[in-house]
Image (tube, rainbow, N blue to C red):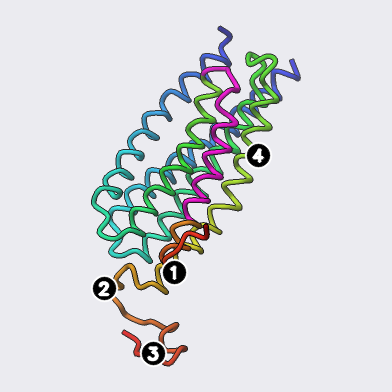
Amino acid sequence: MDTELINWTLVVVGQILVAVGVFCDFVAALLMIRFPNFYVRLHALTIGSIGGAVVPAIGAALIAAGSPFLGMYRWFLAGGALVTALFIFILGGAGAHAIARATYRAKAAEYRPCYVDQLAEDRGEVGC
Amino acid sequence: MSFLESWITNFLTITMFFYIASFLLYLVRLFKGPTIPDMILAIDALGYDLAAFLIILSILFKNPVLIPCAIVLTLWIYALDIYVAKYLEAKEMGE
C-alpha cells in the first residue's frame, strides 16, 4: 500500500504544479496582448516562460515519476522533463535580457507611455 | 487502465486545451506585434510553452521520443533571441 501512497502524493503534487503553470501561462498570454509597450511585455514574457513552462515541466516530471503505468519510460520522462525545466529556467531570463538590451540600444521599440527613463538620465541623454 | 492512469490522462487532456488557448493568444500578439522585438517576444513565449506542452504530450502518449525535441526547441528559441539581439544592435549576425 505504501508505494501506492507515494505514487499518489507525487502525482497530486505534480498536478498542482501543472495547474499553477497552466494558469500562469494563460495569464501571461492575456498580458502579452494587453500590455502597452515592448518593455512591459518583457514581464509577460518571463511570466510565460518561467511560470508557464518551468513550473509545469517540473510538475510533469513529478507526475511521470509517480506513474508506474509508464513502465520502462517512467524515469526517462521524469529526467527529461527536469532537464528541459533547467534549460528553460536558465535560457528564459538570459534571452529576455539580450533582446531587451538590443531593443533599447537600437531603439527598435518606441517607449510611448514614458513616465521615467532613468537609464537615459544616467547617460546624460534627455529623459522622457 | 488503473484509476491512477485514467486520473492522469483526464487531467492532462484538460490542461492541453488551456495550452492551445494560450498558444492562440500568443499568435494574436505575433501577428499584431507592431515592432520586430514584439514578435520575438511572442515567439519566445510560444516556443518555451511548446516545450512544456511537448513534455505533457510525451506523458500522455507514454513515449519519450518528444523529450529531445523539447530540449532542442528550447535551445533554438534561445539562439533566436541571441541572433535577433545581435542583428538589432550591430546589424550583422556574427557570421
Q: Measuring 27% from the left and 74% from the top, which residue is drawn there?
A: A113
Q: Quadrant of residue B27?
A: top left
- Label count reads 4
What label sits on residue A73 in the rendered view?
Answer: none
Please tell me whether mark 1 sits on a helix, a strand or a loop. helix
Tag 3: Cα neighbours inside 10 Å, few (<14), some, or many (≥20)? few
Cα distance between the residues tagged 4 and 3: 44 Å
Please tell me whether mark 3 sits on a helix, a strand or a loop. loop
Tag 2: Cα neighbours inside 10 Å, few (<14), some, or many (≥20)? few
Callouts 1 and 2 in the same chain = no
Please tell me whether mark 4 sits on a helix, a strand or a loop. helix
> Residue B15: percent from the left, percent from the top?
43, 30
What residue does disc 2 label? A112
Callouts 2 and 4 in the same chain = yes
Q: Measuring 54% from the left and 57% from the top, which residue is drawn there?
A: A93
Answer whether residue B25 is magenta in the image: no
Q: Which residues are magenta?
A: B61-81
Please tell me whether mark 2 sits on a helix, a strand or a loop. loop
Tag 1: Cα neighbours inside 10 Å, few (<14), some, or many (≥20)? some
Callouts 1 and 4 in the same chain = no
> Residue B71: percent from the left, percent from the top?
58, 38
Q: Is residue A17 left or right of residue B18?
A: right
Label 2 resides on the chain identified as A
What label sits on residue A125 in the rendered view?
Answer: 3
Cα distance between the residues tagged 2 and 4: 39 Å
Q: Is residue B62 left or right of residue A19?
A: right
Q: Amino acid at mark 3?
A: Glu
Callouts 3 and 2 in the same chain = yes
> Residue B20: percent from the left, percent from the top?
36, 33
